[in-house]
Amino acid sequence: MSQPVILTCALTGSIHTPSMSPHLPITPEELIEQGLAAAEAGATILHLHARDPQDGRPTADPAVFRQFLPALKQHSDVILNLSTGGSSRMPLAERMQAALQTEPEMCSLNMGSMNFGIFPLAERYSDWQHAWETELLEGSRDTVFKNTFADIETLLTQLGQQRGVRFEFECYDVGHIHSLAWYVRQQQVQTPVFLQFVLGVLGGIDAAPEQLMHMKNTADRLLGAENYHFSVLAAGLKQMPLGTMGAIMGGHVRIGLEDSLYLNKGQLAPSNAAQVHQIRHILEALGYRLASPAEARQQLGLKGKQQVNF
Ligand code: KMH
Ligand code: ZN
């Protein structure tokens, strides 16, 4: 029997904006409701960003995270993974504050500076609810998503070594895998590592099957297949097909409204749980099952939900 599939559900992110879908969770109450529903539907991990409850603008304010983290922890066994990516225009010190204070089991760690173009989304919509939405989208044309080696080392040290946080290493291209392999060789990162192959972000590798194979082959060559677990995150409409391909390749899957607002072309997902149900149906039809949080904690070497600070 193939290994159970660790399913990450990324609830809201900082790419999509409120005017793009009425189903994108914004407030702490909506994040709690959608997070628990996604966990109930089978999600193993929730990848979490926060938003200003007033207008949906991305925020990294620890006080906002603290409005929803305790309820998610109390009412589910799901693994809570805090983003240190925030939004690409935030400085790292701001992006990592919530994780420093709450000391979660997992955090994302972005493995390189890059362009992160979400400005093409602006031309697909018209009646905007908030002025900040088009400013954020257009602003990505001239923003570098900064993740220098010093930034990476700050996260490895202050969250990894000092707080026992394990990482979802976000790799948007093969160069990011090269950087991670270097840190493994420097013994600054312990194996097995958990790689998130991110495909389809404008500025990173494109979302095509041959590129997923290229990322996998690169990780095998630079890390060794026995030294990493991988998950597949494809942005937009490639989310379900490339995620499914990832599971078939022996990997794990990430879905969620952070990365795609859709179930299918032209069909908005009515919730994060609907995407969980969809990928679960596909995977189970192919003979796979979803991993429980307990199985994933064991496989990824997590510290346990009682070791967090919320
Ligand atoms: N939005 C994803 C493409 C992070 O939060 O650290 C990448 C991401 C980064 O989730
Ligand atoms: Zn994220």
Image (cartoon, rainbow, N blue to C red):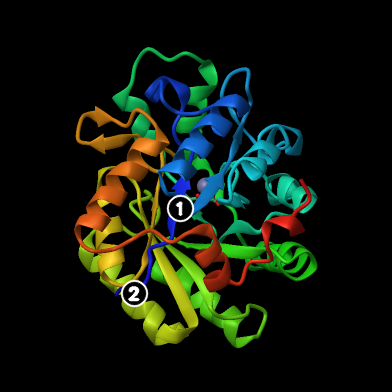
Residue matched to label 1: 8
Density class for disc 2 (Cα within 10 Å; few <14, some 14-19, many ≥20) is many
Dot 1 falls on a residue whose secondary structure is: strand
Q: 54 or 95: nearer the eye?
A: 54
Asked whether, in this view, residue 141 is left or right of residue 86, the answer is: left
Query: What is the secondary structure assignment of the residue under circle 2?
Result: helix
Nearer to the camera, 271 or 13: 271
Out of 234 and 146, give the one closest to the viewer. 234
Q: Does the beta carbon of the residue at mark 1 sit less than 8 Å from ligand 1?
A: no
Give the residue type that dot 1 points to. Thr
Q: Is residue 240 visible?
A: yes
User: Which residue: 48% across, 59% down?
Assistant: 292
Mark 1 is surrounded, within 10 Å at the Cα level, by few (under 14), some (14 to 19) or many (20 or more) other residues, namely: many
Point out the image quarter for the N terminus: bottom left
What residue sits 40% from the left and 38% below the top?
A: 273
The image position of residue 115, as x and y in percent, is 46, 51
Residue 24, given in percent of the width and then of the height, sits at 45, 28
**Residue 161 percent location from the top left of the image:** 75, 71
